[in-house]
């Protein structure tokens, strides 16, 4: 081999070894610092955003044993229906074991078009927290999930139905899901 080829091979070898050892030592020296800083300053006292399921619930009425308020947080297709009250003076309450910080809630009417057409839809609601803070909620007449910001600590949530779309000839009010997103507070 010529001297030029030997030098080229040696240079490539040295660069390769330097690159690999640089990656190793960078991770060894700086990697633990990044992990430590991330854990200390970002996750030490903070829970991740999550779905917060109530420990129990109550409702003003329900159509039958299969359409109770428990269906509102089971992430399934069933839902809550009132006992043919046409949404008048209806409410649902969620209770939590501990105080929770609620970031937002999502509310859904029935997603299945047949059930959506057969039920009266809620138009206006108010959400009340354990300290009495009220949040107005206006629902679209839609099968889409609807998002409402809260940013509030509470031990329970009460959803009061204020009005409906008064679907002609239908007396049963309904919701498919009320999902709460936030963090536990200890």
Image: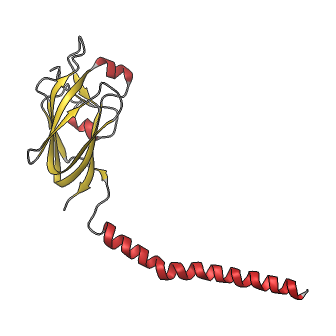
Indicate the quadrant where residue 171 lies.
top left
Residue 11 position within the rendered picture, expressed as x and y whole percent measured from the top left:
76, 84
Up the image or down, 44 lies above or below 115; here it is: below
Answer with left or right where residue 6 lies relative to residue 131: right
Indicate the quadrant where residue 174 lies.
top left
Q: Quadrant of the N terminus?
A: bottom right
Along the line of sight, the residue nearer the viewer: 70 or 104: 104
Up the image or down, 13 lies above or below 111; here it is: below
Residue 20 position within the rendered picture, expressed as x and y whole percent measured from the top left:
63, 79
Name the residue at the right extreme.
1
Give the residue at x 22% y 26%: 123
Q: Quadrant of the C terminus?
A: bottom left
Along the line of sight, the residue nearer the viewer: 73 or 11: 11
Name the residue at the front extreme.
4
Name the residue at the left extreme.
132
Name the residue at the top extreme.
169
Q: How many marks?
A: 0
Residue 82 position within the rendered picture, expressed as x and y whole percent measured from the top left:
18, 25
Along the line of sight, the residue nearer the viewer: 68 or 182: 182
User: Please, which colouring scheme is shown?
Assistant: secondary structure
Answer with left or right where residue 28 lies relative to residue 20: left
Give the residue at x 8% y 48%: 131
Along the line of sight, the residue nearer the viewer: 38 or 76: 38
Indicate the quadrant where residue 61 lies.
top left
Give the residue at x 21% y 30%: 65
Up the image or down, 56 lies above or below 69; here it is: below
């Amino acid at each position: 081999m010529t001297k030029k080829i030997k030098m080229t091979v040696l240079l490539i070898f040295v660069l390769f070894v330097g690159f690999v050892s640089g990656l190793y030592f960078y991770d060894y020296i700086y990697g633990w610092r990044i992990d430590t800083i991330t854990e200390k300053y970002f996750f030490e006292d903070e829970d991740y955003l999550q779905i917060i399921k109530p420990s129990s619930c109550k409702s003003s009425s329900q159509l039958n044993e299969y359409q109770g308020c428990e269906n509102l947080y089971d992430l399934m297709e069933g839902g809550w229906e009132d006992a043919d009250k046409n949404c008048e003076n209806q409410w649902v309450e969620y209770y939590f074991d501990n105080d929770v910080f609620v970031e937002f809630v999502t509310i859904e009417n029935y997603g299945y078009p047949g059930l959506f057409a057969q039920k009266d839809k809620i138009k206006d609601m108010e959400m009340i927290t354990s300290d009495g803070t009220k949040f107005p909620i206006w629902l679209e007449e839609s099968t889409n999930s609807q998002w409402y910001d809260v940013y509030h600590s509470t031990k329970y949530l009460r959803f009061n139905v204020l009005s409906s779309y008064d679907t002609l000839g239908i007396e049963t009010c309904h919701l498919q899901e009320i999902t709460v997103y936030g963090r536990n507070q200890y």
